[in-house]
Amino acid sequence: MKKAMYFLFPFYLLILIACNNQENSNADWEHSFVVWEGYNYIISSDEIKETEIGEKVDEIQTYLDGEVNVSKNDIFSNKFKKGTLLYSIKGIDKHKSLGVKTESGYVKINSNGKYGEDE
């Protein structure tokens, strides 16, 4: 009986590890991002002064906690929750960069092109 347990224990351990990795792999993106008006914006660590913030342009409609199919016309993020506000930045084209309102201020997000196109 003990020999059977020694034989089966690594097998059970392997199954547990494999199942755990499947659950975590869904939300394993290369970057934190926002998609707005069909453009993909990578979240930077650059803070923006409130005096540089322009008008409110939109808000996050969907928070993605896993890789799912969404329309490129939706406004979504894998970092910011639904309702997070997006702003223009004075003097910068909205399809180049936007500002995102966070608890600690504003952070800059930078477009790397149309969503779904290769970089």
Image (cartoon, rainbow, N blue to C red):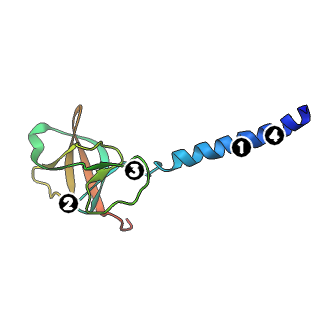
Circle number at residue 95: 2
x then y, percent, for residue 2: 89, 31
Give the amino acid at mark 4: Leu
Placement of the C terminus among the 4 image quadrants: bottom left
Q: Which of marks 3 and 4 is in front?
A: 4
74 over 12 or under it: above or below: below
- The residue at 66%/41% (across/down) is 16
**Do tag 1 and tag 3 residues touch (Cβ < 8 Å)?**
no
Secondary structure beneath label 4? helix
Question: How far apart, in angstroms, are the residues tagged by discs 2 and 1?
Answer: 46 Å
Question: How far apart, in angstroms, are the residues tagged by discs 3 and 2?
Answer: 18 Å
x then y, percent, for residue 60: 24, 48
x then y, percent, for residue 11: 77, 43
Quarter of image, res 53: top left
Q: Mark 3 points at which residue?
A: 31
Q: Residues within 10 Å of mark 2 (few under 14, many from 20)?
A: some
Q: How crowded is mark 3: few (under 14 residues within 10 Å), some or many (20 or more)?
A: few
Q: Residue extending furthest front?
A: 1
Question: How far apart, in angstroms, are the residues tagged by discs 4 and 1?
Answer: 10 Å
Placement of the N terminus among the 4 image quadrants: top right
Q: Nearer the viewer, mark 4 or mark 1?
A: 4
Q: Name the residue under label 4.
A: 8
Earlier sequence position, callout 4 versus callout 1 = 4
Earlier sequence position, callout 3 versus callout 2 = 3
Q: Mark 1 points at which residue?
A: 14
- The residue at 78%/40% (across/down) is 10
- The residue at 52%/49% (across/down) is 25
Q: Nearer the viewer, mark 2 or mark 1?
A: 1
Q: Say left or right for 98 vs 117.
A: left
88 over 84 or under it: above or below: below
Q: Nearer the viewer, mark 4 or mark 2?
A: 4
